Image (cartoon, rainbow, N blue to C red):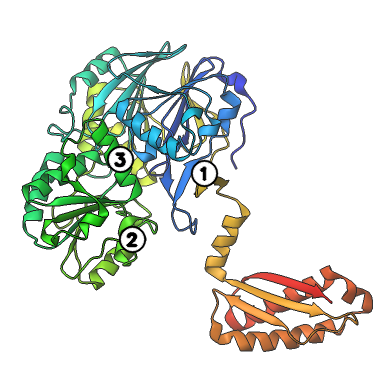
């Protein structure tokens, strides 16, 4: 069990790395660095919830440790605007007392989310100029532009008196990106020549051999795919994948189609991209209402829902519950994204629903409609050859990705590779590279705009209800301590066909045992409740082989 640090003295001298999220998982990236008692945080992101959190879509990292170091935390630096790196800022804004730095586009995305929460003025959000160093008390930060699936993504060089650290964030080698300049290896080679103490690196595609494809290839492919169809085309992708959306715009223009944006986050991010002049063809966009009026051969719909989220636009469209958009036979839905691990079941369920409606499905297995924004194994190997770090720390990945990353670093002759867990603090220098502290961390669940601990009782209840169901019983005891004959019993999440049998057996069992109680025992609510629970558990287990949660309403007349 993780414990809360009560010994901040160990951080007074030395260089430390402490992940609070992002290791052993995809998403919730949150990394702390400490140099001689001063701290910085890189990224504060969210992640998708899986089936162990019923009814929950999003999780954010638990950052209670920030309260302990709030007087020494100099800054939060956002590497880029993806939600898994920046999406938790608004949810955790009440805990943030230091400045938050982000370059212009991610800053605009964060501002939009803060406005939704009414928190815009509660965070000191500052625009970062990546062409200049950010000088803090014990850190000097330099920024290297990289290629990814969103504009203004930077690797961060952390210069300290103990040596240089390279926090790669998300990256790939793309010499023909849709946005920005091609990947420039020169800065990484120069950094390697200066010396790198540790590389803290993206592991997402470490288990994929070879090199990733270019976003330019997707643009050409989408134009070809669009030309094959005369019906509606729906493209679902991440709303923050601005490069992909620009390529969809190009394909739509080439094929004389207008674009309707569906989904709140999709509209917000496109507004930000237009405002930042990243998208200049804003005339191509039409409203949801207009989308229902133009010929289907002239329409492309871009929407959220590529991960099968039940509150997403595509989910509502697939279930024919969207107010303005309805699909018909032979329409086409293109999944222009990767499946995030853990979401496969919900994604496949959504695809199956569309297929049953005779809607054609296209994925990256059929055509090149998606390329990853993360480098493959050979690209990671090149990064190590350029930078030559002493220490490798794989982050941003599940255990299998971290292990693949470790094999690459070891094959690249990196002397030390450390696979950590969230909450484990690694001392980098001086002296031996070793774990020195164990910090309480974990996840908070997002319910609306509120946060609750992922171990909250109501989540445990939901989990249990989803597996075992609920049995609810109401029993009234008369003044003379006899049992009212009108016993009410309900089964939720259990077979209704057996309700009468359960009810009859329970009545017989309970009444027989109740009559054995003396007057004092019958007068005690707790004694009677305990008896009801014991008897109902026995009956349900005997008939249904289940152990449901039992809710009892005892009424005394």
Residue depth check, mark 2 versus mark 3: number of the one nearer the observer: 3
Cα gap from disc 1 to disc 2, whole angstroms: 26 Å
Residue 206 appears in view: no
Rendered location of residue 98, percent (x, y):
50, 22
Which residue bears the numbered disc 2? 315
Quadrant in which the C terminus appears: bottom right
Q: Is residue 466 above or below residue 382?
A: below
Q: Are marks 2 and 3 in contact (CB under 8 Å)?
A: no
Cα gap from disc 3 to disc 1, whole angstroms: 26 Å
Rendered location of residue 159, percent (x, y):
38, 15
Q: Residues within 10 Å of mark 1 (few under 14, many from 20)?
A: many
Question: Which residue is depicted at the point 61% across and 19% down?
Answer: 9
Element type at marker 2? Answer: helix
Relative depth, front residue between 5 and 373? 373
Question: In the figure, residue 470 lies in which quadrant?
Answer: bottom right
Element type at marker 3? Answer: helix
Question: Which residue is depicted at the point 20% across and 69% down?
Answer: 328
Relative depth, front residue between 212 and 275? 275
Relative depth, front residue between 194 and 433? 194
Q: Is residue 430 above or below residue 513?
A: above
Q: Is residue 55 above or below residue 60?
A: below
- The image shows a total of numbered marks equal to 3
Cα gap from disc 2 to disc 3, whole angstroms: 20 Å
Disc number for residue 269: 3
Which residue bears the numbered disc 1? 443
| Comes first in the chain, label 1 or label 2 | 2
């Amino acid at each position: 069990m993780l414990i809360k640090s009560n010994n901040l003295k160990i951080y007074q001298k030395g260089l430390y790395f402490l992940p609070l999220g992002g290791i052993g998982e995809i998403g919730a990236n949150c990394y702390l660095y400490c140099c001689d008692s001063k701290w910085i945080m890189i990224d504060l992101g969210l992640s998708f919830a899986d089936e162990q959190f019923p009814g929950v879509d999003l999780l954010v990292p638990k950052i209670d440790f920030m309260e302990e170091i709030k007087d020494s935390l100099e800054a939060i630096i956002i590497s880029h605007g993806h939600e898994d790196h920046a999406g938790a800022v608004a949810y955790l804004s009440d805990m943030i007392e230091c400045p938050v730095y982000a370059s212009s586009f991610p800053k605009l995305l964060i501002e939009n989310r803060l406005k939704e929460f009414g928190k815009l003025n509660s965070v000191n959000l500052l625009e970062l100029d990546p062409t200049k160093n950010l000088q803090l008390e014990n850190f000097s930060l330099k920024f290297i532009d990289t290629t990814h699936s969103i504009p203004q993504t930077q690797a961060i060089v952390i210069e300290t008196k103990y040596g240089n650290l390279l926090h790669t964030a998300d990256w790939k080698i793309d010499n023909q990106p849709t946005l920005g300049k091609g990947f420039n290896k020169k800065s990484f080679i120069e950094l390697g020549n200066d010396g790198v103490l540790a590389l803290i690196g993206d592991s997402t595609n470490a288990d994929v051999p070879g090199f990733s494809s270019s976003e330019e290839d997707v643009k050409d492919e989408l134009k070809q795919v669009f030309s094959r169809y005369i019906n509606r085309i729906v493209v679902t992708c991440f709303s923050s994948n601005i490069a992909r959306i620009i390529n969809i715009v190009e394909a739509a223009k080439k094929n004389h189609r207008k674009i309707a944006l569906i989904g709140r986050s999709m509209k917000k991010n496109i507004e930000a991209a237009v405002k930042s002049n990243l998208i200049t063809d804003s005339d191509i966009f039409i409203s949801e209402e207009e989308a229902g009026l133009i010929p289907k051969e002239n329409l492309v719909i871009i929407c959220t829902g590529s991960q099968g989220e039940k509150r997403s636009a595509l989910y509502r469209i697939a279930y024919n519950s969207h107010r303005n958009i309805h699909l018909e036979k032979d329409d086409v839905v293109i999944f222009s994204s990767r499946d995030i691990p853990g979401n496969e079941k919900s994604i496949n369920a959504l695809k199956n629903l569309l297929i049953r409606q005779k809607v054609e499905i296209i994925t990256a297995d059929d055509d090149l409609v998606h390329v990853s924004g993360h480098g493959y194994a050979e690209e990671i190997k090149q990064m190590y050859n350029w930078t030559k770090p002493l220490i490798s720390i794989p982050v941003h990945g599940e255990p299998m990705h971290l292990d693949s990353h470790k094999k690459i670093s070891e094959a690249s002759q990196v002397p030390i590779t450390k696979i950590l867990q969230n909450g484990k603090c690694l001392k980098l220098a001086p002296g031996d590279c070793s774990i020195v502290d164990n910090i309480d961390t974990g996840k908070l669940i997002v319910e609306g705009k509120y946060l609750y601990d992922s171990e909250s009782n109501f989540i445990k209840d939901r989990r249990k209800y989803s597996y075992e169901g609920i049995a609810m019983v109401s029993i009234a005891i008369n003044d003379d301590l006899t049992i009212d004959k009108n016993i009410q019993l309900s089964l939720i999440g259990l077979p209704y066909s057996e309700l009468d049998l359960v009810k009859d057996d329970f009545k017989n069992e309970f009444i027989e045992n109740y009559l054995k109680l003396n007057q004092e025992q019958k007068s005690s609510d707790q004694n009677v409740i305990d008896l009801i629970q014991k008897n109902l558990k026995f009956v349900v287990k005997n008939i249904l082989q289940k152990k449901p949660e039992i809710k009892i309403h005892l009424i005394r007349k």
